[in-house]
Amino acid sequence: MSDNVLYWIATAPVGAASVLTEELAQFGACDIRERSHDVKFQGALDVGYRTCLWSRTATRVLLSLGSVDATSSKNLFDAVKRMDWREHLAPGATLACDCSGGNESIRHTIYGSQLLKDAVCDSLRDATGERPNIRPERPDVLLHRRGYRIDGGRAPLKENVAAAVLLRAGWPAVNEAGGMLVDPLCGSGTFLTEAAMIAADAAPAQGREYFGFSGWRGHDAALWERMREEARERRAARIPRRCILGSDVDPDAVRMSIENAEHAAVADWIHVEKRALGEVTRPNSDLGLVVANPPYGERIGAESGLSELYSELGRTLREQFKGWQAAVLTGNPPLARNLGVYAKRTHRFYNGTIECRLLRFDLNEASEQRPAEVVRADWSGRPGAQMFANRLRKNLKLLDAWALREQVECFRVYDADMPEYAFAIDLYGREGRHAYVQEYAPPKTVNQESARERRREVLAVLPEVLAVPPQHVHSRVRKPQKGTLQYEKRESVAERHVVRENGLKFWVNFRDYLDTGLFLDHRIMRQMLREWAQDTDFLNLFCYTGSATVCAAAGGARSTTSVDLSNTYLEWAHENLLLNGFGGAEHELFRADCLEWLESQTVWGPRFDLIFVDPPTFSNSKRMEGVLDVQRDHVGMIRRSLKLLRPGGRLVFSTNYTRFRLDTEALADLAIEDITANTIPRDFERHAKIHSCFLVRPR
């Protein structure tokens, strides 16, 4: 099969596709067609294998099996099902399906993935009588990632972006000419390790134990092993030369850099030490490359010292590295003016979702800006910042007085009131107040640099207007989450705070997760549950951090039962209960798939008087079977829950899916009252679709 021409697609970060194209040409690819984020090419199987093994810039390498009509979900399903999957999957093989993009018919990537999976499985079942197993982690048939990085630090640079920057900046040529590389802000050492792997002629994927094609029927194991043996021989032929130097003022960063280099087996090429930027000096070499990825200042309050940092970096480049080349990757281009050096070339790159600029310099007298003055951007003084500050100040005056009267400590003070400043801003607490800022991710049609400037304007005026210390302002970007991303940690600092609501206390976390642990728009709903809970047995499905359970317990519930699939949230719910003095055995918590748990409980018959069902919009947790889609599944969810409801009881169904439509026809036999309007707090009136809420009873 290796003699046959196959069709391939290699994806890459935006900005790296041209570098990937050069790699593919070296691998023997033909008919190469470069696009912004991927490259299409042709080649025999060995070309695809070589790309998987040797490409330093590709994100994924995909074998194209053809194109199908996906204008509707039925067309996509039927077309995929017609394909003969026996050519690719052996009996008993496992697979994983992924989907990107969408249209009016296929609204969500999870739904698209489910369609693909069902079509493939049904096709194989019809052809062989057996259905393949789905294994999201390490399936027989999938691809990606280096695998050397033990720890990436708080904001790690992606490995293939780092490699693309080095290749673009000319590191192979500098290295081959006997030059050196210096990273004076090395962080976790991604530049260092990637540079060492290039110098050592080490295949980036050589150390990986698992590849997504391992169970593919077209896999040529002998050819693959020959290519890996060739890579081992090439690596062994290089004699280590300690030509890559890194430093950082943070000792933890130095430790991470060393550990990552050791894990990648290139530590012999690298020297890393703790050193402040101002103490960095040029090694004894007339030829070299300085590469750096300084902080971007995307966090509130994080930009205050960055002008000086960039200025110091520029001073170090000018004074210590004359005659060298330099490459600076920054996600904050205006700050780069503080370098005091003219860039000979600029390139656009994306590090994840952050748009960056790669600035390349020839460090000589002609490159210096004269005078090399520090350029500081006064974001707070810009007209847009002042207009935003005035609106925020007006909102705060009205809502803070209302919140004080109503004894509300946590509330929303701004919600995209000015469309060009698309932020949601919440205040938490009275003493030691915190602000939680969520930016609605700008669409691709919006100029990203303009969006970034507006963000900086907002960050500049927030602390003063809200009277909140900069260190108490926390920011997030809200965008549609894929798969389990909506539940995963953003950081791991375990920084928690106690806030109060209607005499109750709750733990919140402003940094580790996308949400804080307390949905402020549910404030009235929680109070209603509290008022209805007297002498009831209460069930909280998809309980999250258990705030509704705490309210029911405070309202005098005889017992509470809380169910969620996440251990983290169940522990959080338990701690919220204990925080309010509800630690008895009558408050039970169960870790389970809520839909499966409902099925298992029907044998016991009705045993709850008050049920609260608040599912996520989508979920495809690794621990649950299939995909939950609240629009598609809500009818079954409500009917299963009603089987556990005692006569005269109440079921409250809530969802934050803004386009949700209750299927009244399928639920026509039930008494349903839309209580949404009664549950929207005053501070969310500007965003009345923040959630939908229904009171459901049997007729």
Image (cartoon, grey):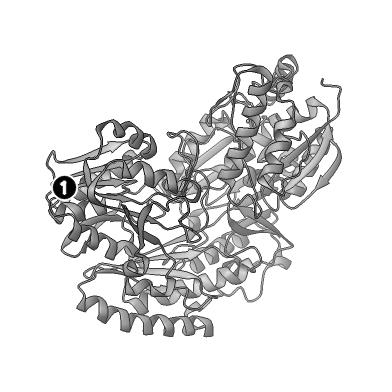
Q: Position of residue 263 (x, y in %)?
A: 52, 30
Q: Please give the name of the residue rendered at 66% of the width and 72% of the height, measured from the top-left corner.
A: 369
Is 76 or 473 nearer to us in this picture? 76
Q: Residues within 10 Å of mark 1 (few under 14, many from 20)?
A: some
Specify the quadrant of the image occupied by residue 534. bottom left
Above or below — where is 510 with respect to 263? below
Is 468 or 581 nearer to us in this picture? 581
Q: Position of residue 311 (x, y in %)?
A: 54, 67
Q: Position of residue 346 (x, y in %)?
A: 71, 61
**Relative to 347, 629 lies left or right:** left
Pick the quarter of the image with the N terminus: top right
**Relative to 94, 608 lies left or right:** left
Q: Please give the name of the residue rendered at 18% of the width and 48% of the height, measured from the top-left corner.
A: 577
Is 370 or 17 nearer to us in this picture? 17
Is 441 or 250 nearer to us in this picture? 441
Above or below — where is 219 with respect to 676? above
Q: Could you tell me if residue 244 is visible in this image?
A: no
Above or below — where is 433 with respect to 629? below
Q: Position of residue 72 (x, y in %)?
A: 69, 48
**Disc 1 target residue:** 578
Q: Please give the name of the residue rendered at 52% of the width and 58% of the height, measured from the top-left corner.
A: 479
Above or below — where is 405 with respect to 636? below
Specify the quadrant of the image occupied by residue 138. top right
Q: Please give the name of the residue rendered at 13% of the width and 44% of the height, measured from the top-left corner.
A: 583
What SS does tag 1 mark? Answer: helix
Specify the quadrant of the image occupied by residue 515. bottom left
Under mark 1, the amino acid is: Leu
Pick out the residue farthest to the top. 222
